[in-house]
Amino acid sequence: MEKIDLKTIKKRSENEFKKAVDLKELDEIFKKYLGKKGEITQILKTLSKLPNERRAKIGKGINELKNFLEEKIEDKKSYFTKATEDKEEWLDITAPGKKPVVGHLHPLTLIKRRIEEIFQAMGFSVVEGPEVETEWYNFDALNIQKDHPARDFWDTLYLKGGNLLRTHTSPVQIRFMEKNEPPFRIIVPGRVFRHEATDAKHEVNFYQVEGLMVGKDVSVANFKAVIQEFLNRFYQKEIKLRLRPSFFPFTEPSFEIDINCIVCGGKGCSTCLGQGWIELMGAGMVHPNVLKNSGLDPRNWQGFAFGMGLDRLAMMKYKINDIRLFYSGDLRFLQQF
Amino acid sequence: MIFSYNWLQSFFKAKLPKPEKLAEFLTMHAFEVGEIKRRAGDFVLNIDILSNRGHDCLCHYGIAREIAAILDRKLNIPKGEKLITKKGELQPVKLKINCPNLVSRYSAIAVEGVKISKSPQWLKKRLGTLGIRSINNIVDLTNFVMLETGQPLHAFDYDKILGKKMVLRRAKKGEKIITLDGVKRDLYEGALIIEDENRLIDLVGIMGGKLSEIDSTTKNIVLQAGSFDRRNIYQATKNLRHSTDASDIYSHGIDPNLTIPALERAYLLLKKIGGGKIVQLIDVYPKKILPLKIKLDLDYVKKLLGIEITSKEIKNMLKRFGFKVVEDLVEAPTLRLDVSIPEDLIEEIGRLYGYQKIKPAFPVASLVPPKRNFELFWENMAKNILKEAGFTEVYNYSFISEEDRKVFKRNNLAEVQNPVSAEQKYLRPSLIPELLKNVKKNQNSVFASSSAGKEIKIFELEKIFKKPKSVEEKRMLSGVIAGDAFYEAKGVVDLLLNKLGISSVWYDEYQPTPEESKLSIWREKRCAEIKTDNEEIGFLGEISPKILGALKIEGRAVVFDIDFEKLQKLASEEQGYQPISAYPAAVRDIAVLVPLFVKVEEVLNQVEFSGGKLIRDVDLFDIYEGEEMPEGKKNFAFHIIYQAEDRTLSSEEIDEIQQKIIEALEENPDWEVRK
């Protein structure tokens, strides 16, 4: 019986495997060693003829070799197949993704939510009121005199058979104060109406947010802090603001709030018309007549009120140049938000 | 109003700050200054006089008073000449005031021997800077005094006043007057006018009459300074749709104490530039206006403004405005008609102190969390759901046109009395008309071509208005899908209601009465009422071809129209948890051949009823009507899901129930279970 040199076979076969370049060659090698007539198969067949002791020894070695070769062959085989698979499974990762169809909320809804969130965080409740109003709530109770040029500021749409479309959200101040005891703080978002020819800056209906805080000693200083905080959060940066005297029949004193132009930072540009400042809202300390008309005693209560245009805020935030786009229903516009 | 910088300077000895600087002072402490323009050696400032200060600040002296207070400067008071009457030739004018409640003061002088000429250069220049054309010395003089003092003046040609009679009265219906500008004006009933013997010679407070105009031959004049009811003048200008500088001032109401000083000022100038002597002085002033005394509490000043300030500082500031202060009593000059309560004084203190200087301080308030606004909560939720379902939110106008009203056959609408345009004649009774117009518009737009395959799916959540008796408003939630999309829309409504926690929803066939059907916007037999229990909360359906045609919409459109007030009352955050069975579920399919008119629901009910409680769910996965089906039949295919909570169901058990279902279905002779 010739000597079976397993080590030599291992070395030789391993070399051959390494050199194999494709599946076909690999198959040849497989046949050569592990095929029906393969070298190792042949050795295995002869094992039975060997004496017990030697059979055990060689058997163990040859089985190890067989397993070793089989593993090698499997590795190399999967290497070859993977290469072809990869070629077939190639993805062009630059091709566009498939977008799920989602809708869009209106930009004014987005702005309104942002404002509500900030004021709610400062303890203001959100309150609403009717759009069809009486002269009393829209004007008289707010200390806006009849037949006075001041009333011309609010060009009004009247309804046949009485009543009118509210020209501002301020009537809700009265409605709320009639039913609630101070101290309180509220904001009132809502749709308002003006008798106005429509153009890029004017609409027949638009949105306002009204604010009202009443307490024992709510002051101008308090208003400044609250509104500064609101603006910083809304624009997510420190905003420079200024208060200058103004007149509203329902507040005394009254002021206008300008902010440093957010586009040019105050240097002067087309947005602020070279002024460096943008008019943002009207505000003031609630007029004692307004408190009285709401059933509150002005000797006990005082507070601030403010009002601003939502459309205007949205136009500045998104750099929209025509207010009419908001009410156009044009999906090319709306689906940008 | 525009102001001359040089004119303002004339009230001060020391030089004023440069125009830009002065503008900034005024903006921050009084009135916003807009444009500043250079004009022939002068500057013109456009100052936005606030509407509560028209009575004292629509004049140069008024702005000078503001400047004096802001800069703490001494002010030169314009000089006047005492009105002393001399003996003359002229017969006195007889004045009669028929409506004393409209005339708080009437002052006038008759001047004999005036010489009409061109105005001197300085006067022309003052007026020219402000864009006012020079006419003659007398007319220019009246303009000058008004622009300086804020008291409108008017000059009549004495010789053109017939009968030397002046009657102040309200105009009667149908009366007309030709004003100085040559326009014949229809007077509104009640407008204040002056009549001589038998002709209207002045439209009081607005414009003089042509009949008594000053011309080159005028020798004697009546110079008038009146104080009239502001409401009357305001209404008259509104009715005439014509306002003048004088009527602007009068509409705000003026201090009656201004008339005599203004005439004195005018007379001083008249002597210089036109001559003549006063032969008659008229001054009817039945109820003298005295200064108001207002009690001011120092602590309240501090509390309202939120500043620390001493009483000395306060007194000082008030004095700069011309207020007299004795202890805690403040006396406001009569020309400050806007000051009557302590808050008015606090405003003066605040703006002089400078709102800029007030340090922001957060209010001290109890830590009460804001009240939850449920309406808003559900509104946000509903909008989010629809957005996630692929809908785009639109905002439309609150109005519809007459044409829309006809197309949609709506009655009982709230009508606008003074619409801006015909498009906005009525308040919208439904969100649907405009949503459909949005569809049309987007079908037309580039949107349609540029985004092929993109569906038009839009919604709006806003108020609608109805007018059964008085106007009622309520919120609706309505949406539209363009195309043959009934089931898609139904799926969206199901999703919406489900996410809002509203169960017990069902769809009832909409069966309009013949009368309703004529007015209906829905396509017949393709519309459902959305109901919970027995309440109808909205509609879902295809829009009728007639309406689509009228709006020129291509293809079909499916709309849901839900009463949001009802919806948000039904909505609930409560959510139950269904235990997940530990035992496996088994699925068996069943296909039923039924006549075309049979509804899914009928079959479904039968399956569920006969199957009993081991059926966890029944899913319709196919409806087929087509060529391979027997004539007049269609096929429903269901997955039936069996599951028990306490054990694994054996296949025999399931087969038995399945068999029971088949038998129950086939009890109906027209139904056939396909095997």
Image (cartoon, helix red, strand yellow):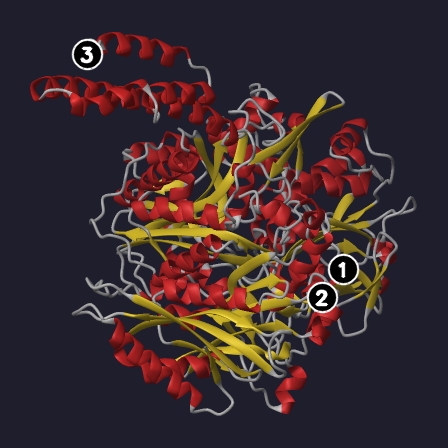
The picture places residue B301, in percent across and down from the top left corner, at: 31, 42
Q: Chain of mark 2?
A: B
Q: Residue at x 56, y 20 (%)?
A: B17
Badge 1 element: strand
Does residue B432 show up? yes
Badge 2 element: loop
Tell me the crowding category of disc 1: few under 14, some 14 to 19, or many 20 or more residues within 10 angstroms, Cα based.
Answer: many
Q: Earlier in the sequence, mark 2 or mark 1?
A: 2
Badge 3 element: loop
Q: CB atoms at circles 2 and 1 under 8 Å apart? A: yes
Identify which amino acid the numbered label 1 is placed on.
Leu
Rendered view: A224 above or below B434: above
Q: Which corner quadrant holds the N terminus of chain B?
A: top right
Q: Quadrant of residue B663?
A: bottom left
Q: Residue at x 58, y 74 (%)?
A: A162
The picture places residue B74, in percent across and down from the top left corner, at: 50, 27
Residue tagged 1: B203
Instruction: Let me know if marks 3 and 2 both belong to one chain.
Output: no
Instruction: Let me know if marks 3 and 1 both belong to one chain.
Output: no
Identify which amino acid the numbered label 2 is placed on.
Ala
Residue tagged 3: A1
Q: CB atoms at circles 3 and 1 under 8 Å apart? A: no
Q: Which mark is residue B191?
A: 2
In this orientation, which residue lies closer to the viewer: B281 or A215?
A215
Rendered view: B311 above or below A122: above
Q: Residue at x 59, y 62 (%)?
A: B481
In the image, which is nearer the foreground, mark 3 or mark 2?
3
